[in-house]
Every structure is written in C-alpha cells, then in structure tokens.
Image: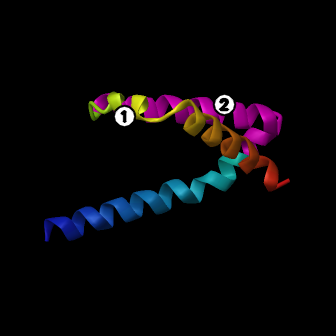
Amino acid sequence: MKNQKQAYTYALTAVLLWSTVASVFKITLGHLDFLQLLFYASIVSIVVFFAVLLIQNKLFLLKTYSRTDYLHSALLGFLNPFLYE
C-alpha cells in the first residue's frame, strides 16, 4: 500500500510540474531571448545532475566516459534545441 501511495504522489508531482512548463516558458521568453533561455536551462541542468551524482556518491562515473563520449553528447545536446526551429 505504501508503494502505491508513493507512486500516486510522484505521478501527481510530475503532472503538476509538467503542467506549469508552458506557462513559465512563455513568461520567460517575454524577458529573455531563446538562446539565453537555453543557456540558463543548460547551466541549471548541469548543476542539478552534478548535485545528484554528488549526493549519490557517484562522481567517479564521470571518469568512465572518454573524451569522444563527451564530445558526442555535446554535439547531440547542441543539435537538439535547433532541430525544433
């Protein structure tokens, strides 16, 4: 029963957070250029993912990837927002 309640809580939280994305995106674009928005979103993502790795004590995983892996990921990350334009 506890797992089901936790699943409902996570689902409700995801729906509430996802439903605000469009509104926040529209308001933010009124104040920032889309490139600035992409820049800040990328910085926040890097910080959050780094914090998660730090909290989970898994920073060593960053060393398991090669330079080619990082370059490939950066290229795909760069292409993604521009393919929508």
Cα separation between marks 2 and 1 = 25 Å
Question: Taking 39 as reference, is 83 above or below it?
Answer: below
- Closer-to-camera residue (74/64): 64
Q: Is residue 40 above or below residue 21?
A: above
Residue 31 in view in this figure: no
In the rendered image, residue 16, in percent from the top left (x then y), is placed at: 49, 58
Placement of the N terminus among the 4 image quadrants: bottom left
User: Whole-percent x and y of residue 17?
Assistant: 50, 53
Instruction: State yes or no: residue 45 in magenta.
Output: yes
Which residue appears at 60% of the width and 29% of the height? 43
Q: Quadrant of residue 78?
A: top right
Provide the major secondary structure of the magenta segment: helix
Mark identifier at residue 40: 2
Kindly state the secondary structure of the residue where label 1 is placed. helix
| Residue 20 part of the magenta segment | no
Q: Residue at x 66, y 46 (%)?
A: 24
Which residue, given by chain and number where applicable, does mark 1 sit on?
61
* Colour scheme of the rendered structure: rainbow
- For the magenta stretch, what is the residue range? 26-55
How packed is label 1: few (under 14 Cα within 10 Å), some, or many (20 or more)?
Answer: few
